[in-house]
Image: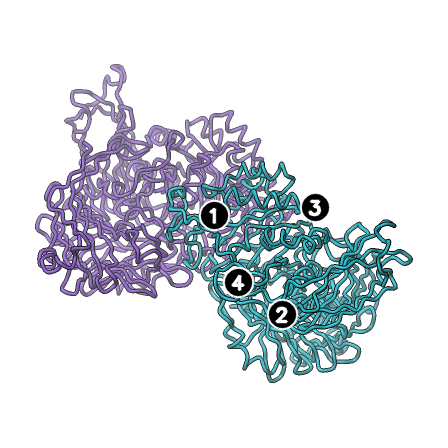
Chain colours: A cyan, B purple
Amino acid sequence: MNFKQNLLVRFRLDRKLLGLLLVWTSNFLMQAQVITSPNKNLSLQFELTTNGVPSYQLSYKDKSVIKPSTLGIEIKDAPSFMDGFSLTDSAQSLVDDSWNPVMGEEKIIRNNYNELVVTLAQAKNNNRYIRIRFRLFNDGLGFRYEFPKQTDLNYFVIKEEHTEFKLAGDHKIFWIPGDYDTNEYAYTTSKISEIPSLMKKATIEINSQFPIKDLAVQTPSMMKTADGLYVNIHEAALINYPAMSLNIDAKTFKMSSHLTPDAVGNNGYMQTDTQTPWRTIVVSDKATEILASKMILNLNEPTKYKDVSWIKPMKFIGVWWEYFVAGKSTWAYGKENNVKLGQDFSKLTPNGKHGATNERVKEYIDFASKNNIDAVLVEGWNVGWEDWIGNWKEEVFDFVTPYPDFDVKALHAYAASKGVQIIMHHETSGSATNYERRLDQAFQFMKDNGYNAVKTGYVGQIIPRGEHHDGQWMVNHYIHVAERAADYKIMIDSHEAVRPTGLNRTYPNWIAQESARGTEFEAMGGLAPEHTTILPFTRLMGGPMDFTPGIFQTDLSYYGTGGNQRVNTTLVKQLAYYVTMYSPLQMAADIPDNYNRFPDAFQFIKDVALDWDNSYILEAEPGDYITIARKAKAKNEWFIGGITDENSRTATISFDYLPKGTQYIATIYSDGKDANWNEKPQSYTITKVIVTSKSVLKQYIAPGGGVAISIKTGTASEVKGLKKI
Amino acid sequence: MNFKQNLLVRFRLDRKLLGLLLVWTSNFLMQAQVITSPNKNLSLQFELTTNGVPSYQLSYKDKSVIKPSTLGIEIKDAPSFMDGFSLTDSAQSLVDDSWNPVMGEEKIIRNNYNELVVTLAQAKNNNRYIRIRFRLFNDGLGFRYEFPKQTDLNYFVIKEEHTEFKLAGDHKIFWIPGDYDTNEYAYTTSKISEIPSLMKKATIEINSQFPIKDLAVQTPSMMKTADGLYVNIHEAALINYPAMSLNIDAKTFKMSSHLTPDAVGNNGYMQTDTQTPWRTIVVSDKATEILASKMILNLNEPTKYKDVSWIKPMKFIGVWWEYFVAGKSTWAYGKENNVKLGQDFSKLTPNGKHGATNERVKEYIDFASKNNIDAVLVEGWNVGWEDWIGNWKEEVFDFVTPYPDFDVKALHAYAASKGVQIIMHHETSGSATNYERRLDQAFQFMKDNGYNAVKTGYVGQIIPRGEHHDGQWMVNHYIHVAERAADYKIMIDSHEAVRPTGLNRTYPNWIAQESARGTEFEAMGGLAPEHTTILPFTRLMGGPMDFTPGIFQTDLSYYGTGGNQRVNTTLVKQLAYYVTMYSPLQMAADIPDNYNRFPDAFQFIKDVALDWDNSYILEAEPGDYITIARKAKAKNEWFIGGITDENSRTATISFDYLPKGTQYIATIYSDGKDANWNEKPQSYTITKVIVTSKSVLKQYIAPGGGVAISIKTGTASEVKGLKKI
């Protein structure tokens, strides 16, 4: 299917006839424009109010999702696009086509929507005009403002975007505080009306945070209505524009756009022909359909890269978790707390705990090679870590100078001889200007030394000073890095960057991001057991997350470094994450020693695929549980992950997506009966059974636990004696 | 001569003994520290006030230059370095050595000063300490604050520097308004007390200006006292610090430092071991000695470049002046006023006036080749000029994409075949971030296409937004560009950059700057005839200026493009500028056609040297006149330039620097008797005479006029018949 149709009515008014037709068109076009989703479940109505203010409303199966809400853009030092509009053109069309992502949860993604484009002119401003484009999919609505090239509009600065989302009730909402600089908050679940009283507690201390002064939450904002409707508000294709948070009116349940300002308080520098990102509202009465939605990807542009053959999924380990838990190693090499690029770092006083040594990295390479892990991430390899944080320092790292105990060329040769990649690490400490001015040299250094992927980091206050992680300048920066990386055929995994909006479709080498509270926080206070049942409904709506799962040694007192800190999951839940937390880049984050202690459980990590033909969201409820099955790309292998929150449950796992009539061997990694995230988290059992498309498994999951299943075809002898379910 | 001595007293106190010695040292060290210049003319006294506030005073031949003035640095969110100091160490030394600049006004520069370094500790702040280093030369004082590495001081942010210069009276001052973004103001001459009433008028409109809200003027600040002392305040070695302006107290005649803030209002990010730039006070009772001073260069660090053989003087013409005056050509190629990088510029609608065409550039190359001019600057060669200005746009230029009618490779080949260089042009429109991220590619493009020098431009509001041309971030940017250019063996001529502070010693490939109101303003309202008698006492104190002299067709109505605009000089004064306005990079700025009309006068431009063994400031009075003679580097050729303001005068030109006993031929380019900047500016005479070291020439200079003389040895037949003076 690949066709476009103008289905319903289409008005295009000759501007010269505008005067003559004004009375007629005013009457005619003042009427509301309505489109429905292809399956008719969703209905979108657009109209201009009597003052010429754009207004839209959205309903799902006759339930109101968004009550009449106004739209507008406030301009700095020029007339705004807020009111006084008349409708001069209205066009509708149906699109139904499909495309193949470079990597993804589905091999084929269907792109099916009805579109309404309204052209709105301001007679009071010399008929200057904008367009609003609505795309109504079966799974939700996307719309954006467009600013075509026109005589009286070239450059303008946005003072604020005034997009309203008037919600139909006091919904349950899974939220984190609005913040210009960090997404790494823990989630609060409450009614919308409760947000004001909970905001202070929710705004926990995080490095380089900038909480929004207004009452605001971040997107993706996941909500559930009293009558069982799931509503998710986010944005798609965030390019050359600041990220949007949502101001909250806790009394009327109105959300409204709040853009991230720049250093001088402006909210976006625009040049026609241009547009805003898409504002997205994913809607369903089934939580599983929220997770299955590909609407945000569909609203992003196809990639312009001509060659994507070098973009590949990657499973990796890394010199990383030991920095958080083992107490035996550090990013820094020297004891000093005041260093400068250009000095001789070999003359520092070694602190004796440097992690990224030749010896240690070789151990990781050996482990990766032995276990068929693609790559080893090495953090702390380059000079500058002694005082990298908290000083708003411009030139912390140069990205090309290793510590004296890290031999770039020798380690590359060693890794290559073992068939293992090394993943580069570029921590910027928030100094994006420093990174940009060194970027070509940094990427050339990578290519010269065999690196094909880099983990980037933005810990710290942004430089250019006054800019924010989520502002227009930084939004452009991340994309600049991705595009420049593509010139060098380098893949990017960005940490502390702006929350993703489906740009991995357009820039497929930007393969994963952190941009949320990830595993590292398990070593810094712990994540709530429900956290990972929320993330797929929030953060992961925008794109793959480098969550860094795979922690087997969850009780961190094991390391004898003080405290009773723990990772708040069972061991099996960590396995399940490889399926529930989608990413084509997956870390096995624990220290190799711990995998050596549990080789049978580690087998799942070795086996699990990273790229998929199909995904099946079997069960899901935000804050409670998620069960997903996925078919490996171009292989007759399936992997299932199921997780729960702090409560035990019995997952109902169907297998009806398996080809009919064939028996498969399912290896089930399940929590022990006595397992619990807080006690005996390492109690697990591994059983093999035979499954067919007709099988249904009722699987116990421990509190804070999970289940992981791998499914393969088996030879007759392998199948023999296995129980069939 | 190359020796260092500790001459006078030296105290260094063991910190452990500090307590025991406190009473004794307090008494002893509370006494003023005094040093004199090597020739004893200048005397500097330092002391701590009773509150432990640092204070200094400066006198010249027993006349007070700076009355007791306090010193201090205010720190953000931490204790300041303002008071509560005790003197814990005081060291004096004499330095007398010399060095050879890569290019310059002198082949050998003597560096001779007495130094006083005081170490000042704050008992109230855990004995945190700073140093103040004073260097007293025969021609003035330099001093700076130093922040050594110490346990209790690593990183700090400067809120304001409080360096006072309490002047001894209501001096005459040549000033331009304090501004964070531009140096391109016209000079006002007044008493200090008159500045408040004149500031508004002086603050004329200039592109991208940011006048300082306080009453402030820029440095170099040139003053003359009622009793004939010349005092010049500026700074040297402005590195990793914001540029300083001077707040004015018009009643007490106190000047005080005013730093250029960053985007969030901070005035400098500091990491020990570090220091401020030098604050400089050049003093003499002879104006000629102000111009002869090399103190600012001496206070800069020697270059770290290992190879400087590729750094050479350069005389050039350019596709440039015609953009201002001829009305026949433009930087832009297209008629459009809204373009974006990446679009196909060959599809623009040509405006029919594009200047940088293959044909036109070849004409310039031909002219340069024929007249032994080293190079041709071409502005407007690259895409983006259609809407380059005024939009605070980040990505205006990419520095690598030519317009469709400019063939980079063909023109390079053509120029090379004629022995001519092409000078690259990188206008950034103030978007320094865009320039930095493209810098490596831009420089590589230059090397790939045979370019060895680039004129950079910063017209427009700076990006990073909120930063200023003269702030710390941009100060670092210019240096970054110079250093990176050196990696590619590229020379830099920066326009609209921060005013220079002698950094051409440290970064000798940064060969010239504009950073003042230059010739282009002759086409935009005109320069006052006195302007160029002031610039050498102000702007040029910091380093070479790309003033772009050489305009022969001064009456711009010649071009028939409307108005009676004119360049406010005689033709001969334009010749004199090649000597009075020092730069190793000199443009012959007029259109070649005009040089073809006056070939005999153009001969001086062809002949004049760019690099010198010696310079002799024969006569000078700021605002009135300047006469300078210089000996060409490694040649027995001398060139003399003399200029006057709007008043005619008779210059007294001595030749006593010529080797004794030899006759030389002097070719004298002088204003015609009827010449005047406003009428008959092209009236001139050229005469040849014989001069010896005993000659003295009394030379008439017309109002707004000048004199230019070239001196060479002559053969007997050449000398024959010439008059001897």
Q: Disc 3 vs disc 2: Cβ atoms closer than 8 Å? A: no
- Residue B612 image point, x, y percent: 28, 31
User: Residue type at mark 4?
Assistant: Ser
Q: Residue furthest bottom?
A: A251
Residue A604 placement: quadrant: bottom right
Label 4 Cα crowd, 10 Å radius (few <14 / some 14-19 / many 20+): some
Q: Residue at x 55, y 46 (%)?
A: B398
Three-letter code, disc 1: Thr
Q: Is residue B173 left or right of residue B157?
A: left
**Callout 3 secondary element:** loop
Q: Judge whether A130 appears above or below B110 on screen.
A: below
Q: Nearer the observer, disc 2 or disc 4?
A: 4
Which residue position is annotated with label 2?
A529
Element at badge 2?
loop
Element under disc 4: helix
Q: Residue furthest top?
A: B716
Kindly indicate whether the residue at mark 1 contacts the one at mark 4 (C-beta within 8 angstroms). no
Marks 4 and 1: same chain? no
Q: Which mark is residue A308?
A: 3
Residue B243, image x, y percentages = 33, 53
Pointer 3 and pointer 2 on the same chain: yes
Q: Are marks 3 and 4 in contact (CB under 8 Å)?
A: no
Q: CA distance from mark 2 to mark 4?
A: 19 Å
Q: Secondary structure at mark 1?
A: loop
Q: Position of residue B311 (x, y in %)?
A: 39, 32
Residue B561 image label: 1
Quarter of the figure with the C terminus of chain B: top left
